[in-house]
Amino acid sequence: MSKFILNTVQLNSEPDLLLKVSQGDEAAFAHLFHTYQNRLGAFVMQLTGSRPLAEEIVQEIFIRIWEKREKLSQVEHFHSYLYTVARNYSLSFLKKLGRELAQKQAWEMSVATQGEEEDAVIRNYRRIIDQAISELPAQRQKVYLLSRDEGLRQAEIAERMAISLETVKKHMVLALRSIRSYAIAHPEINVLILVLITPLTI
């Protein structure tokens, strides 16, 4: 990547050039831009410490100069004017960038905190459900866990346990009823997530 270098081109009649730019002469503006681009870039890079930022800021400064070109005819010392604009804009840009970074960091911390809180809720939910399951009668507990953990259908559970399909269905209904009742008795758990208790047993 090429480095910023000091452009030593001197304008013979800068006031005339500025006048042409103020009147909307694009060729004159291009001349002005190329004359000051590198030296202004070097100046801005000293302020920002970043070449990409310096390039972006220089582009933005000249865009603003073109947008307000009518005022150029009133500028007596363009060099001083340009560097004052560049310094003010660079400092303003850095302050804005700092605020954006601070907001981003605050948002990331908020998301991380929220994630930790959600993880805590999920862990608490699982703990309560596991406690409820542990209090089920042995056979009913086994029916429920075969459905939830192994994903077996009710007919497969009946075959695995050598019991009737109706017995499996009865155990599932009673198990779900007991678990829901146990969970609802704990106000720290959101009742809306109790639907997660129900395994797929069709």
Image (tube, rainbow, N blue to C red):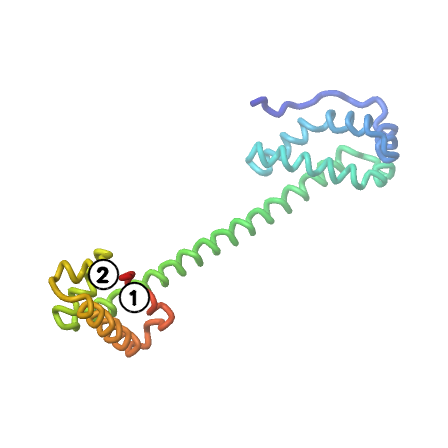
User: Where residue 75 sits in the image (x, y, percent)?
Assistant: 83, 37
What residue is rendered at 80% in x and 34% in y? 77
Horizontal placement of 188 versus 11: left or right?
A: left
Please tell me the numbered disc located at residue 147.
Answer: 2
What residue is rendered at 85% in x and 28% in y? 17
User: Where residue 81 sits in the image (x, y, percent)?
Assistant: 76, 38
Identify the amino acid type marked 1. Answer: Thr
Real-space CA distance between mark 2 and mark 1, rounded to the nearest whole angstrom: 9 Å
> Foreground residue, 157 or 44?
157
Q: Is 116 situated above or below 183?
A: above
Horizontal placement of 196 versus 33: left or right?
A: left
Please tell me the numbered disc located at residue 95.
Answer: none
Question: Could you say which quadrant of the image residue 65 lies in?
Answer: top right
Identify the amino acid type marked 2. Answer: Ser
Q: Is mark 1 on a helix, strand or loop?
A: loop
Q: Crowding near pointer 1: few (<14 within 10 Å), some, many (20+)?
A: some
- Residue linked to disc 1: 198
Q: Is 27 situated above or below 114?
A: above
What residue is rendered at 60% in x and 49% in y? 96
